[in-house]
Structures are given as structure tokens and as C-alpha cells.
Amino acid sequence: MSWQISADQIEDLARGAAVFGTGGGGDPYIGGLLARRALAAGPVTVVGLSEVPDDALVLFVAMMGAPTVMIEKLPSIDEVVEPVHALATYLGRPVTHIACAEVGGVNSTIPVVAAAALGLPLVDADGMGRAFPELQMVLPTLSGVTASPLALSDEKGNVAVLNTIDNGWTERIARVATVEMGCSTMIAGFSMSGVEARATLVDGSLSRCAEVGRGIAVARQEKTDPVSATVALLDGRELFGGKVVDVQRATTTGFARGSALIEGDGATTLTLRFQNEHLVAEVDGRTLVTTPDLIMVVDAETGEPITTEGLRYGQRVRVLAAPADERWHSSAALAMVGPGYFGYDLPAHRFDGTVSDGRAAVA
Amino acid sequence: MSWQISADQIEDLARGAAVFGTGGGGDPYIGGLLARRALAAGPVTVVGLSEVPDDALVLFVAMMGAPTVMIEKLPSIDEVVEPVHALATYLGRPVTHIACAEVGGVNSTIPVVAAAALGLPLVDADGMGRAFPELQMVLPTLSGVTASPLALSDEKGNVAVLNTIDNGWTERIARVATVEMGCSTMIAGFSMSGVEARATLVDGSLSRCAEVGRGIAVARQEKTDPVSATVALLDGRELFGGKVVDVQRATTTGFARGSALIEGDGATTLTLRFQNEHLVAEVDGRTLVTTPDLIMVVDAETGEPITTEGLRYGQRVRVLAAPADERWHSSAALAMVGPGYFGYDLPAHRFDGTVSDGRAAVA
């Protein structure tokens, strides 16, 4: 079932996406600005995964780099479409559909910009069902879809097309190029047929983002608790509430890395550790939830999602957790995005406090 | 006038090229090994610049990276041709001629390998008439020839095609990619027509390299001084003779940077400063010669050229200087390769001790 996304729906979409973005994926305000500009000429058609023809050419379009830099450099519409043109030329075939690599404030709206500017349909799906910091961290990688050829471009007009031996190498080379190009690039890659897209993407992501974003807006209008509304829509739970008392942050090797301390109402303290996205939540040294499940920080009153670069001393926040797509709990997936990959010697703790055994069935 | 280059001429070519390489461009032994292997099936035709058809597609093929790494990683023939194939596919046109970007022990023989493996003629010319450490530092850059599209590839099979706004950006992105890819890549780029090649390249470079290399070999056989023979063939002069007493060296950001002290027979000391290539020669703090003119270190007895990474404590050496192609003395060229570019607050000192005024006519 297809639907239209127009400028007036972008705020809900970007806000909902920023919730799923688990602190990363960029600022929803920035993402919304550009998408509204791109949609001024008319809406974009969003098509369900089931409607994508088998022989489609579906591409991920995204912004790569530290979200701390994205705040300072809003890309132009031309920049967003540049890597798509470069990749289509390289492939020698027309692109038929645009998809989101991840959900997040910017990376759910950048594909809207690309679809609008190119007059292409957008797929109601994404590659993660959340945001992760590295390019290879999408479900298609687990099924053998190659990131390359992947095109990246910067605001100055430099373009690179990468053709690598695996998706980890695409990440490595694209990352150093992105850092050199000013810490922020636009990328297009992960060419997929309709068959591959259906087999690997998370279905209905954009609809879910819009639903969560709308739920927050409705709760505010109705003076009910927007945070509870979000928890219910995510099938998640609230982990903690309190005040941000410390944020350590550094932009290194193209990532925003750091930690935040949140002081609870009792004598408890929650520690969040992040690399663009929240990866680990601990209370008083005890691990509560880790990647790949979703850890989200929202404003305690308004329910507004707060990105890792938006965390500030004194903010009253609530910390939520929700289940990741179950495919992220296979042993291969945990090797790619589990706590160990990011340097934490911990098993993956699910949103409900149980430990993931790595035996999840991969569809 | 075309000629054939066969395996038995490679030693002379590589040795002569290592002289012009001014300490950089890689080790002639390494370069020779691979070229002899590639020429086992038959010689390569070397054509004069005047014989290249106007509508030819001439490419530079070279190794990029710190020469310190080249010593440890001899590329395969497949690796050398990989970026040529990638670029030809990208351009959608067959490559007709291979040329050397620089003269140097490896970068004069890598193009021989490419020409042999691809069955293409090699142009008797190069882009510098010497070696320089950065990719944009070729005479074609000064005439507006673009480095991109430029393909680079590593031993693992990763390939990138860069399309940048200027040759400085090609260098920047290719350099960080090269460092990430293991500090050594094979590159192909600077596509030129025959008209462009004739207008910008240094004519007859390979013949000159072979002549200098042969001159050294003949002098050894005839028990005359091979260093004097080299000086005469280069129209240069001998600056200094002595013993290497100190070498400081670090491989940083993909370059071999450092300095060497040579103690003379009197109480004088010559200091060499290098970044892959020798850039500045000083005696007792007084600048003698700087880039763009050629500063070369050779074994005092055998005349064997010594690369910057081959400098060792105790070596008895002689330091020579020779004029660069006069086009390197224009003000635009000095801005790109003069001492100031490398951080030395000095005017360019020519091989004969006069100061370059930046007013050289560019042909």
C-alpha cells in the first residue's frame, strides 16, 4: 500500500525517526529543514516493500560522518543527489527506488530529499530498524548484499566511487575519505534488487516513525504523557528518569564518542556510553541494556528525542529501551553490532534485562 | 622514434631513474624485479612523445605511498593493471598509451609493468623529470590537466575511483585512502590526449634514465668515476662528499619524512631534508640547493643512487645537484613544489647556487 509524504508530515517523521535513532542519525530539526525544502514542489510516494518490483534497483542514500558536524553543515539538495547520479553512471542502469539505510533524524529525511529531487519512489523500510554508527551495520550485510559500488560526495563537489572486497572495507575507506572531506559526506550504495530488499530490509520503518512522531504530538495536544505514548508504540519500557549531570564527548576518527551521567531521583546514577548512538546503559555499574536493542533518551516532559550531541548538563530526561529487529540477535549480527564489537566485554543485554544468547533465528 | 625495452635493459633504466628520483620514487631493485618479471614474455615498445596520436588516451600509472612500505610489499602484476582496468571502465574508452608520472626507481618501472601486461606502448616521457612526493605535483597540473578520474587499488582488491574538484583534492583523498589501505596503492589517472601529453610532459625521460644508468655501468666497467659520469650526463654539479653520520626518519601521514647529516672531509656538515624526496641541502646552515632542482645522493665509489629510505649511518656518499625542467621555476610551479610549500621559509635555490626568481617562462 503506497502513501504520499508531504512537507507537513516531515516534522512527525523526523521526530519519530530520531526516537528510533537511539541518539544518532542526526538532528531531526536539521533533517526536517532540508526535507521540507525538497518537498515544496510536491509529495514523495512511499511504497511498501511488497510493491517493489523484483528487478528494481533500490539504493540506500544517507549522510555519513559525525553528527556533531552535520549540525554545522546543512547539505544542499544537489549534494544529496550527487552520489546517486555518480552511482547510476557507474552502474550504467537507472535507479528505481530510494531507501533509508537507518532510521534517525537526518538519515530518514535525506532519502526523502533524494526521492523528491529525483522524482523516485521511497521504500517504506530501512536497513536497521534503528541507527548504528558504521556503514556496514545493516541487515543486508548479513545476507551478503555488498555496500559497493558505493559513491560518496562532499559539499565541494568531490566524488569517490568505492568498489571493495567487503562492507567492512567500504566503511574503512569511506570513513577516512569522509574525515578528510570535512567529516560529512553524502553516500549512495548497497544496490539491491526488489527481491534482495524484501529479504533484508526492516519493513514499514517510515510508517512506524511517522506513527511514533504523531503519537508524541497528539499526546502533547491532549496533555497526556508523550513518553508513555512512545513506550507503548515501541513495545518498550522506561528504564530511568533523572537529570543529566555530566557529558563527556569527543569527535574522533569521524565519530562522536562519549558518555553521559544521569542522576536519578533516588541515589542511583545511570551511565550511557555512545558512539554516535547509545550503546550501553548501566545503573550504578550494573548493565541494563546494550546494543543491538534500542536505548533512547527523551525530554522528560515533551518526549522530544535527544541526540547524543544534543545532551546537555541539567536536562531532565527519561531513558527508554525497546527491542531491536530480532535479526540483530543472531550470533553473526552480534559479532557485527554487539557490545564486544564496540569494545565492551559484555553479552548483549536485551531491552527487558535478559541476556541475548545469539541464537535468534535469522529470517 | 620508437624503441623496445626488454628485461636486460631494466637494470640501467631503474638505476638511472633512481638518480632522477632524488631519493624518492622507490627502490630501483624492487622496481626492477617486477619489471623483469613482466617483460619475460617480450619487450615493451617505447614511443616518442611526437609519435603519440592527437586523440590518444594516455594515462599515468604509478605506485602511491611511503617508499618505506614499498620495500616490504612488492605488488603483483595483477595489482598494477587493476586501476587501469577500473579507469578504462569508468571512462568507457580504451586506454592507448601508458606514461610515467615521475622518474624514480619504482615509478619508472611500474609503468613498464602496466604496458607489458596490457600490451600497450609506453611513452618516452614523464610528468616531472624527477620525483616529487605528492600526486598533484606534475607539470600537467600546471596546464589544467585533471588528475581525476583517478583509480586506486590495493593488494586486497579494494578499488576506488575519485572524481575531484582539483588535483590537490585528488591527492588528499587518495592519500588518506592509501594510508588506510596499507600505506601503498597502485594508481592510474591524469587521462590525457596526445595533444595534452605533448604540451605538458617532460620529453625523452626514459631514454635519459637509461642513458644515465648505462653511463654508471660503463664507468664501473672502465674503472673510471661513475659519479663524474653522472654529473656530466645531468649537466649538474657535485655539491659535497662525506660520511652519513645521522639519519632521522618517520613514516607519517603516508610519507617518509626526515633529515640526514653528512660529515665532510673538512669540518663541514651537509644537512639533507626530505619528504620521500630530498628537498633542501644545507652546508653548515647555509642553503645550497632546494626543490624543485634535483638533489641526489649516490654511493661515493659505485655511483649507485641511494634512496631516502636507503640512507644508513656510515655510508660514504657524494651529493649531486642538477637543474629541474625549467617549467618548475615559474611562480605557479614554485607555489606547488617550492621550498615554501614544504614548510621551508626559503626562496628556491637552483642547483648552481643562484636564487630562482619565479619568472621562468612556461612553455
Image (tube, coloured by chain):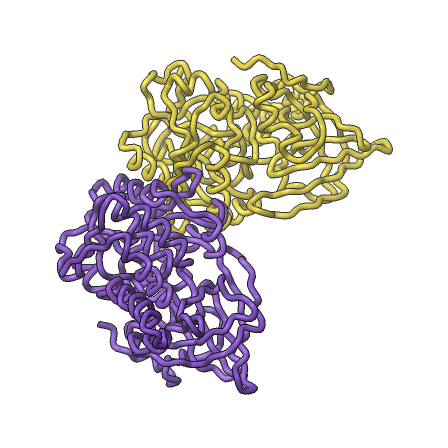
Chain colours: A yellow, B purple
Q: Residue furthest front?
A: B222
Judge whether B44 appears above or below A54 on screen: below
Is residue B51 rendered to the left or right of residue B244? left
Is residue A325 rendered to the left or right of residue A163? right
From the viewer's side, name the closer residue of B247 and A177: B247
From the viewer's side, name the closer residue of A211 and A351: A351
Residue B130 rendering spot, x and y as whole percentages: 34, 66
Q: Quadrant of the N terminus of chain B?
A: bottom left
Q: Residue furthest right?
A: A267
Is residue A61 rendered to the left or right of residue B40? right
From the viewer's side, name the closer residue of B29 and A177: B29
* Circle count: 0
Residue depicted at 22% across the width and 72% down the height: B363
Residue depicted at 76% across the width and 28% down the height: A287
Residue depicted at 42% across the width and 63% down the height: B24
Residue A246 rendering spot, x and y as whole percentages: 75, 44
Residue B347 rendering spot, x and y as whole percentages: 42, 80
Q: Is residue A278 visible?
A: yes
Q: Is residue A77 visible?
A: no
Residue A16 rendering spot, x and y as whole percentages: 56, 27
